[in-house]
Amino acid sequence: MPLNPITFSEQAVHDFLRYQLTAYPFADEHLQAQMRQLLSVSEALRSPLVKGPYISLSRAFKSGVPIRELIDQGVLHPFMANLIPFPTLFGHQEKAIRAIVGGKSTLISTGTGSGKTECFLYPVISRCLRLRDEKAP
């Protein structure tokens, strides 16, 4: 069954407002009533609280090499294959990881959800695994 974006967005707004009402209740009945009024679907849709729905036309991030290739090249510790949940990285992740492992200062600036954290986290974990293997103190 195809997804109806209008119905989906209305349900998302309803769920969000219901969460706000239940997650942050007021002990004072009058304040709770005001919050219910302000967070009603009809009121919220007229306010700047809820906007959209929006359609994003951004392109997918370029793919990088498979994790196995970085392991085979010695860039990442072999056990990383068990920790990284994706078979490949994004191109910017690969570039950043290679730079970090190579000892270069690295700045990662890219969009939300693009794996910036993994860019520095994977080399740190990989280095810890190598130190463990070397029985470093």
Image (cartoon, rainbow, N blue to C red):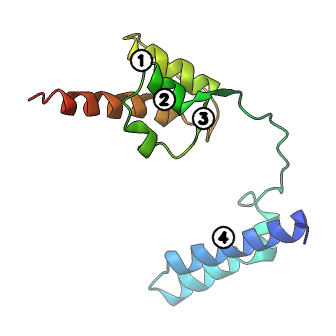
Query: Mark 3 belongs to which amino acid?
Result: Thr
Earlier along the polypeptide chain: callout 3 or callout 1? 3
Image position, residue 21 (x, y; %): 58, 78
The image quadrant that residue 102 belongs to is: top left
Earlier along the polypeptide chain: callout 2 or callout 1? 1
Query: Mark 2 belongs to which amino acid?
Result: Cys
Single out the residue that lies furthest toward the front: 72
Q: Is residue 106 visible?
A: no
Please name which of the two marks, 3 or 1, marks the residue nearer to the observer. 3
Residue placed most toward the observer, 32 or 87: 87
Disc 3 residue crowd, few under 14, some 14–19, many 20+, Cα 10 Å: some
Disc 1 residue crowd, few under 14, some 14–19, many 20+, Cα 10 Å: some
The numbered disc on residue 62 is: none
Q: In 3D space, how far apart are the residues under numbered discs 1 and 4 (Cα atoms)? A: 40 Å
CB atoms at circles 1 and 4 under 8 Å apart?
A: no
Q: Disc 3 designates what residue?
A: 88
The image quadrant that residue 57 belongs to is: top right
Q: In 3D space, how far apart are the residues under numbered discs 4 and 2 (Cα atoms)? A: 32 Å
Please name which of the two marks, 4 or 2, marks the residue nearer to the observer. 2
The numbered disc on residue 100 is: 1
Image position, residue 51 (x, y; %): 79, 56
Image position, residue 104 (x, y; %): 41, 10
Earlier along the polypeptide chain: callout 1 or callout 4? 4
Earlier along the polypeptide chain: callout 4 or callout 2? 4
Q: Disc 4 designates what residue?
A: 16
